[in-house]
Amino acid sequence: MLLDAREVNVRYGRNHAVKTASVSLDHGEIVTVLGANGAGKSSLLKALLGTVRADGTIAFDGTDISGWSAPRRVKAGLVMVPEGRQIFVSLTVHENLLMGAWCRNDDPERETEAIYERFPNLAERRHMPASVLSGGEQQMLAISRALLAKPKLMMLDEPSLGLSPILVKQLFDLIRDLNREGLAIMLVEQNTRMALATARRGYVLELGAIVLKGRAKDLSSDSRLEEAYLGGQSDRASS
């Protein structure tokens, strides 16, 4: 078991954002976390990463990391691509990439060049400010930055937000490719159909609590999920 989080609670003052949620993920697995806006999905990821205070037990790769700081968790191989990408627009593309390698003690040049081979658009703009990138290119940069931390588990928070249907397909193709290369992925995504088609298992959060869980193919045919999230759903897209 790569990640085993049990009875995680997150509170913001009186707001109980995550309520005794237990999630797990195995090596090489894709797991999706679904739910409406405000369900607690992002708070759960932040609790796992250690950027918000949380109660409960979090084990990663066989070690209890509940008391660890976020930087220590990143160094252990637990990384997150946040909602909205949060790239540094005043830095160059290359400088943004190197920010992902801050926790390493070796030279990331080989992996950096491999990223440029995977994403030629980033290679062409490596010396330009990240502000010139399109939304899709910014998302690729955010994922690439996370890859330079040499993760064992990458958590993606709403990666398809604001992307056109063509770019959404390319993004999910990339997620599958990274998984085939051995990377475990936890995917928070409101594009429920694509998420369930990509993941092996899933959890559904409602008002901070897990109300459904199981194999992705079973969840996709569950009447409760169908009514809440799949009925008449259209892929989110923008130009």
Image (cartoon, helix red, strand yellow):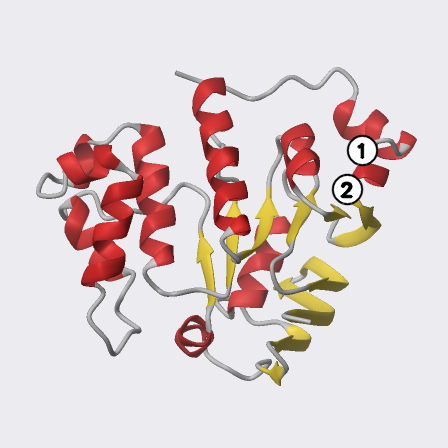
Question: Residue at coordinates 60% horizontally, 20% vertically from top-left?
Answer: 235
Q: Which amino acid is tagged 1? A: Ser
Q: Which residue is mark 2?
A: 216
Residue contact at pointers 2 and 1, CB within 8 angstroms: yes
Label 1 element class? loop
Image quadrant where one finds the N terminus:
bottom right
Residue 164 can be seen, yes or no: no
Image quadrant where one finds the C terminus:
top left
Q: Position of residue 100 (x, y in %)?
A: 29, 61
Nearer-the-camera pick, 166 or 205: 166
Q: Which residue is mark 1?
A: 220
Residue 80 can be seen, yes or no: yes
Q: Position of residue 83 (x, y in %)?
A: 46, 44
Tally the numbered discs. Answer: 2
196 lies above or below 103: above
Question: Residue at coordinates 86% horizontally, 31% vertically from top-left?
Answer: 221
Label 2 element class? helix
18 lies above or below 235: below
Q: Horizontally, is 23 left or right of 214 in the view?
A: left
